[in-house]
Each structure stands twice: as C-alpha cells, then as structure tokens.
Image (tube, rainbow, N blue to C red):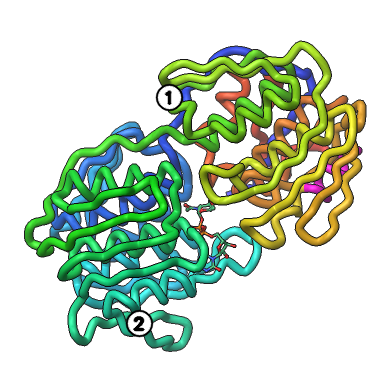
Amino acid sequence: MAEEIIIVQGNGTLEGEVAVSGAKNSALKLMAASLLGQGETVIHNVPRISDIDIMGEVLACLGARVERSGHTLAVDTAQVARCETPYELVSKMRASIAVLGPLIGRFGQARVAMPGGCQIGARKIDMHLVGLEALGVHFDVDHGFLEATTPKGLHGANVTLEFPSVGATENLLMAAVVAEGRTLVENAAREPEIEDLARMLSAMGARVQGAGTSTIEVEGVPLSSLHPCEHTTVGDRIEAGTFLAGGALMGGPVTARGIDPAFLRMALMKLEAMGCNVDAGDDWVTVGRTRPLDPIDIQTLPHPGFPTDLQAQFMLLAARAEGNSVITENVFENRFMFAAELGRMGADITIEGHHALVRGVPRLQGAPVSATDLRAGAAIVLAGISAEGETRVHHIEHIDRGYEDYVGKLVALGADVRRAPADALPSR
Ligand code: UD1
C-alpha cells in the first residue's frame, strides 16, 4: 500500500468533546488472557488500531478464532493447540510477549520469538523471566526463540520485582492464576491496565487481590476452573491525556469522555501548574486555557507518577510555555527522539542524558516531520495544529498502532488535518 502522510494546516483550533476509545495497553493483555478461558471470551470497548490487529493475528496463529463486530471482539480459544508465536508477528509488536504467561499457564510450555517493538530503548524482558522462573518455569534461548518449560509444574512463589514493570507484572499474573498455591508479587506495577486485567481474570474464576497496589496476591486455581467471560475494556488514559494536552496547547476547552479522571491525576496536576483550567466529573475531564502556559518540571515514573506515554505531548506544551522547563525521562532510555522533530518546527530543546531542557518559544513553524514513535507521532500532529503554515507528518503507521481514527477525532474538534497518499502530493 502507498505510504500515507498526515497534512496539517495550523489553524490553532481544538475545541469540543471527544469520546475516548478503550485502552490499547489493556485490550492487548485482555486478549492474551483469553487464552486461559478455553472458550469464547467477549471483550467490549476494544479500539480499532493496528496493534490490536496484530495481537489478533498472534492469537489466530495459535489456533484461536478472533471475530470483531464494531468495538467488540469475540476470541474463541477452545481450539488453541499450538504454543508457539512466530518472529514475523512478535517482531512487529513487543506486546506480543504478553502471551508468554497465559501460554505457560495453559500448556505448561511456550515458544515465543524474542520481541521487537517501539524504538524507545533496550526494553529488556529479564524481569518477566526472573519472575516466571520463581514460579517454576525453565527458559532456554534457541535461535532467537524463548523456550519455556515447567518440568515440575507451576507453583506459587514470592516475587519482588526489581522495577514495577507493567509487562512483567502482567505476565506473572497470567501464569500465577493457575499455579499451585499462593503467589505474592511485590513492587508490582500499579497501572490502571493491571487492575483491568485482574478484573477480567477474576471474572474468569481466578483469585487475585491487590491489583492496582504494589502488592498483588494470587491464589492459584486449577486451569479447568477458569472459564471465558465478557469484559469491557477500561478507557484509554493516554489517548485522553493526548487530547487534553491538545486543549491545553490550543486553549480548548477540550473534553475527553470515557475516562476515569483519577487515572490522569498527575498529568492533570501538571496542567493546572502550567496555568490551565481543569474540570472533571465521573467519566470526563475538560481542559482549557485563557492565559500563556507556565513552564513546568516533569519526571516520568511508574504509575501513579507522570506517565512516560504522555512525555512527548507535555514536551510540546513546555516548548510553547513562557520560560524554561526540565523534563526527565526515567522509564525508557532513548525516548527523546521527538525533541529533534519538534526542533525542525522551531522548538528550542537541549538533551543531556535523560534530561531535556526545553526553552519556550513564542511560535512553531509548519515543517516536514516524522512520527518517531506512537506517542511522539500523536504529539507532532498537535504541534502542527498549533504551528504557522503546513506540517506534513510521515511514518504515520506509528500513530495508527495506537490511536483509533486520530485524524477524524481531531477534525471533529475543529482542526484542519487530513490523510493523503504521500506520492500523490507535489513535493515542496
Ligand atoms: C508498557 C506499555 C507502554 C508504557 C510502559 C510504561 C504496553 C503494551 N505498553 O510497556 O506503553 O510506556 O508500560 O508505562 O502496555 N524493563 C526491563 N526488564 C524487564 C521489563 C522492563 O529492563 O523485564 C525496563 C524496560 O526496558 C523499560 C522499563 O523497564 O525501560 C519499563 O518497562 P515496562 O514497565 O515493562 O513497560 P512495557 O510493559 O514494555
């Protein structure tokens, strides 16, 4: 298919209400967890994005039947007999590693290609492996494949994670639910998506307590007592945060609906500190601004700290603030590629290790730019809306990985944004 780009005319407009989709980072793991249900699991509020399609392919390749109807996904894992995921799929999406825990739980073994994914640092999986080893899993690496076996079966254990890794916590949970005895995961990740996964596992018959806190306790049950269930995916706090950052940048007000404001507490505190007006109800948040943005210091941390997945969007806000901001990235190495793209539009950003010094500038200029990863891609489009003139965003496949109809939602908020085939356009 011909490369598509996004063309943005900087009209500085973003105002109104947007319905937030289901969380990508939750739905992917819920799909993986359906492997433990051995029948038809129905998941609602699943975003239409390419990462979900890839996870669907991973499951299909294992023998599952995956059918979509609107935002509902039916995943029938009754016929799954294989426990191997191929390189072609895993290399497209790192989150495919989420099938490791459930495959081990269901078959006592798994053969999973080593993951690839976003170009945002080394992104190792050592903590997944150390945790699973404590539950009795033995790992070998065979020509780029990770081979997991459980010579003496899965058993509960006390596991303290070195860092509250989201993926490691999820893989551990999905194996521990069918391990014999009790598992205690300490220093567990506390992201809302972990709670969502635990809710679904509980609805399947698992016994999980403490998800959303640093200590998760799992009382293993026999695989045969887990059953398929029906579950609704939690709203995407990062998608919401992206549109709200847009409201802060352009003035808004922008309302994101379909999200628990508590999931965004730190980001909303930072928006208020920058001089924005924030209002929130049960399942919505509104952000607007009537005066210039104040500079801000931000450091990314595991939840409930400031999310790394909103770092680029807030770097953009800092780039337009009146003064100097410092942004520190603590979760991923190499997640500042966005700074160079924003620099092409006139931002003044100096990177020093994992710190970025952002000197606010009065305006940005439209330019040809690239989406360097999923979140940076979403942010660079917002930058284009706020800039003078035209911005052409290349490599928008990154945006399609995680934002359902991003262009359509921005247009509904008044932005002048469209997709176009790259080769059909006159070069400038
Ligand atoms: C998930 C999210 C991603 C988000 C991130 C942090 C999905 C699909 N992705 O990614 O959007 O940015 O959480 O909130 O849910 N690490 C290790 N060894 C490990 C595991 C992780 O060194 O075994 C490191 C990683 O390289 C990274 C950091 O720990 O630097 C955080 O990783 P983790 O929390 O596991 O993030 P993901 O689950 O990959």
Q: Residue at x 83, y 19 (%)?
A: 292
Q: Cα distance, mark 1 to mark 2? A: 40 Å
Q: Residue at x 46, y 71 (%)?
A: 127
227 over 313 or under it: above or below = below
Residue ID at (87%, 25%): 388
What residue range appears in magenta?
339-346
Q: Quick check: is the Cβ at mark 1 less than 8 Å away from ligand 1?
A: no
Give how far across and how far down residue 138 sits, in percent: 32, 84
Left or right: 326 with respect to 6?
Answer: right
Mark on residue 258? Answer: 1
Comparing 374 with 49, the one in front is 374
Q: In this rendering, would 282 be left or right of 91?
A: left
Q: Is residue 155 visible?
A: yes
Q: Is residue 196 left or right of residue 296?
A: left
Residue plotted at (27% across, 72% down): 157
Q: Per the image, is 306 magenta? A: no
Q: Contact (CB < 8 A) between labels 1 and 2?
A: no
Which residue position holds label 2? 147
Residue 255 position in % (x across, y down): 55, 17
Main SS, magenta residues: helix
Location of residue 235 in the rendering, given as x and y in whole percent from the top left corner: 42, 32
Q: Position of residue 2 (x, y in %)?
A: 63, 48
In this picture, is 248 found above or below 290? below
Q: Amino acid at mark 1?
A: Gly
Element carrying mark 1? loop
Question: How many residues crowd around disc 2 within 10 Å: few (fewer than 14), some, or many (20 or more)?
Answer: many
341 part of magenta stretch: yes
